[in-house]
Amino acid sequence: MSVDRAETETNGDRPEDSTLLAVDGVVKQFGGLVAVDGATFGVEAGSITGLIGPNGAGKSTLFDCITGVYTPDAGTVTLDGEAIQGLSPNQVAARGVGRTFQTPKTFRGMTVRENLAFAAREQTGERALGALFRPGRVETEETAIQETVDETLEFLELDHLAEEYAGGLSGGQRKLLELGRVLMMDPEIILLDEPVAGVNPALTDELLERLHELNDRGRTILFIEHDMDIVMGHCDSVVVLHNGQTLAVGPPEIVQEDDRVVEAYLGGYD
Amino acid sequence: MALPGIASFLVTIGTLACIWGLLALGLNVHYGYTGLLNFGHVAFFAAGAYASAVLTMPPPEQVSQANYVIGLDLPMPLGFPVSLAVAALAGGLLALLIGSTSVRLGSHYLAIATFALAGIFEDVLVNETWLTNGTFGMNSVPKPMRETLGAGGWQVAYLAFSALCLLGVYLLLDRLIDAPFGRLLRGVRESEDAARMLGKDTNLVKLKSFAIGGAIAGFAGGLYAHFLGSVVTEQFVAGVTFVVWAAILLGGVASSSGAIVGAFLLIAFQQSTRFILTIYGWIQSVLPEPLSGVLPAIFAPLPDHPSFVPSVRFIVIGCLFVLVIRYRPEGLFGDPNEVTVMGEEE
Amino acid sequence: MASALSQFLQAVAFGLVEASVISVGAVGLTLSYGVTRFINFAYGEFLAYGAFLAFFLSGAGAGVVGLPVAAVVAVLLVGALGVAVSRVFFRPISDRGALPLLITSIGVAFILRYLLIAGASAEARQLPVPLMRPVEVAGVGLTPLELGVVAVSVVTMLAIHLLLQRTMLGKTMRATSGNRSLAEVAGIDTDAVIRKTWFISAAAGGLAGILYGVLFAPFRPTFGFGYLIVVFAATLLGGIGRPYGAMLGAVLIGLMISLGSTYLSASYDQAYAFIALVGVLLLRPEGIRGGEF
């Protein structure tokens, strides 16, 4: 991590060259309720960034705005300098944004192996005609996909569960599987919605270790987390969201001292 | 040479079972593999049947009671494969049309949309006499090679051909579903949100699934039209859709062989119950004198209007829905692991 | 010009009469959706049972009582049928999610419809209502019977409004509909609420069927399933689970059907309802009154 973050301001920092994902003035309303209200921050390439904030701060909605589930009412989301707001979720994903959900959405009626293989990109056999008339090519690709699946299974230590149906996995294993599925897409940036919530402590440590490993391999990670210790201990940068606005952005040790952050967390929810 | 009664009956049942087997395979692509609630399957079947009829019927001036305008009179037997291909195309295109308005909707909306669109399609068939000859029907659809083979030979040959078609479609589907394409469909069934988040265009996937299942149903329609030699609106009522549903639920969703077995069982049940009264008469005729009063005494309280026996058949089908869903959601041959999700909405 | 205007007004009037029938059914359907969260394809059978029970209880059938009394008894019986159906078919699988319930409802529809046909035959029937001359007001003619249908519907809507807003049952229904587990925590006996809602919902369906029978005689046992599309259209248009939306949806659908039949072609009456529905679904999937599905 040699990225220079010394100048990071608490609000309104412009995307710099090293910024992979930039959220700028994003607003999302539902009826009269403002869920995200001008959130602005950047995620630097190669960083692990934590997104924190009290319940109802708009974190998950913001994820939805970034990943195309919602189109923001105002503001821009840029990935590598290109605007991605308003694209559909699959288009955003195709540009290299992987995302997991707070409650894992695994394919429960499919095996762990199938879950992972599903996520591989650009499969000839995904097209009906390709599947029917280009068996050779499909098979070659499939062999490669299965190799990647095996690597991913090994990396996440899920190999013993490969042929199990996802519906039979524990909550923590599902989270791992969902992460693995995202990895199969080989994304540039991974957005994780509370990756360790509800996961037992041993598995939590392992999951965090995996995240660092991934990060070391050059992947950028943005994750939502409630546990301050985890955020402070594992993030290069922290974004604090409060009432849909960015309250503070910066390295954990600085953000932690920010009066407004302290107040937002200790002053209750309004 | 004509077949003797019982053989002819069995051959007819076999052919109908193959045709319904195709319908079930198509619906299974929709619901079993992709989780799409298609309650309008009969529309695709009808589209195929009518496409074949319009393509191969003689021009209206050669037919009595003809109110239709177009009869392209495609020569048999060479026109037969063309007719079937066009039937499949018609089913697929109608599915694309209906799908493009509806696959984006949530699954319950899709159920209602397809149900209603099939109802409207039925209205169209009844009312657009210039194309469909209305409720009178198109009754001169050629039976290919009927003269060459003779009545009995043709029936057997058509059964063999239908069985081959069923096998062919089964094998093609098998290949598709085993390939990453099948994985894609099943993932969309399991969680659309997740599939989308993994970069898959789920609406396109659903549309493809819809078109493939619709094309199979259309193909079945063409096969049906040339088998019966006639196409009449009352063959294409909503009940057909739900018989096919009963077949795939019974056989096991997400299992092609299950769908076929389910269709065979349902057709066998439907057709054999036609003869309940005949069988009753026969039993009554062979019973010795002292017993001949027993059966009438048992069945006397039952109403004797002509709708009674057919209604009992549908009551049984209704019970099938209820019982399979409650006690054996995976049907006879489904995989219980695959259907756990089918109850739940995201 | 005057005749064109009066033709239009007449079509609107007929539309509102049909809307009265639709709204009773749509409100009934939407109430049960509110607490059960699945689309009940057997709902059309409640309409058919209402009309046929009224037929058999009144002068035309066994000749037991007059039509108004027969109608009231039929409505209550259909309500009881609704409770029985939910108990026997739906409650045992209520924890399995919406899809199994929906598919089960198809089976239930078949069972109910063909039990009716097995018992009553597929013959078309007619309620014992007198033929009446239209009363003309400002160039628009409606029979006292049609006006009566509108009146019954308006009274029913008012009753449902008062039920929802002013009674304890209405409050608990709304609470259960909003969030069932929360309602349970708050001490509401949600099972009882669901049972009562089934009664009201089915009874409304029975009433809608009787009104249908009054307007569109003769009717067959299959009419309920056919009319389901129209009732669904109004329900979804109004945003399913929303009684007031269903009323509004019914008015729109009634007008669509009547205007379409008058000015386009009478062969496609249900299609107009459905085209309106698909249009709205595509533009506003949550229905004209919003809300979630």
Image (spheres, rainbow, N blue to C red):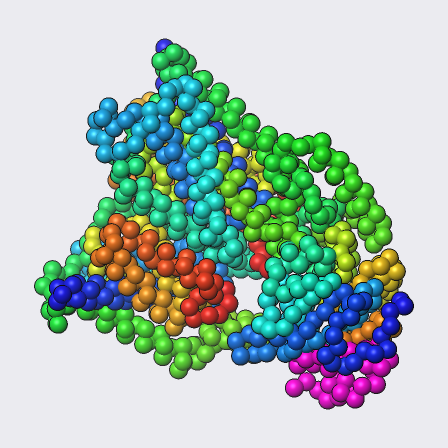
- The number of discs equals 0
In the image, farthest residue toward the right: A2
Is residue B308 something one can see in this rendering?
Answer: no
Residue A206 pos. (x, y %): 86, 61
- The reply to whether the magenta stretch includes residue A268 is yes
Choose between B48 and B346: the one closer to the eye.
B48
Q: Where is the C terminus of chain B found, in terms of image quarters?
A: bottom right
Q: Write down the quadrant of residue C209 in the picture.
A: bottom left
Residue B14 pos. (x, y %): 46, 25
Q: Where is the N terminus of chain B found, in terms of image quarters?
A: top left
Q: Write down the quadrant of residue A200 in the picture.
A: bottom right
Residue B179 pos. (x, y %): 66, 38
Above or below residue A266? Residue C29 is above
From the viewer's perspective, tell me whether residue B59 is left or right of residue C80: left
Q: Write down the quadrant of residue C65 in the picture.
A: bottom left
From the viewer's perspective, tell me whether residue C180 is left or right of residue C164: right
Residue ID at (78%, 70%)? A16
Choose between C56 and C152: the one closer to the eye.
C152
Choose between B176 and C62: the one closer to the eye.
B176
Residue ID at (65%, 78%)? A38
Residue ID at (37%, 23%)? B74
Above or below residue B180? Residue A262 is below
- The reply to whether the magenta stretch includes residue B280 is no
Tell me which segment is drawn in magenta. A241-270
Residue ID at (42%, 62%)? C280
Residue C44 pos. (x, y %): 36, 56
Above or below residue C184? Residue B273 is above
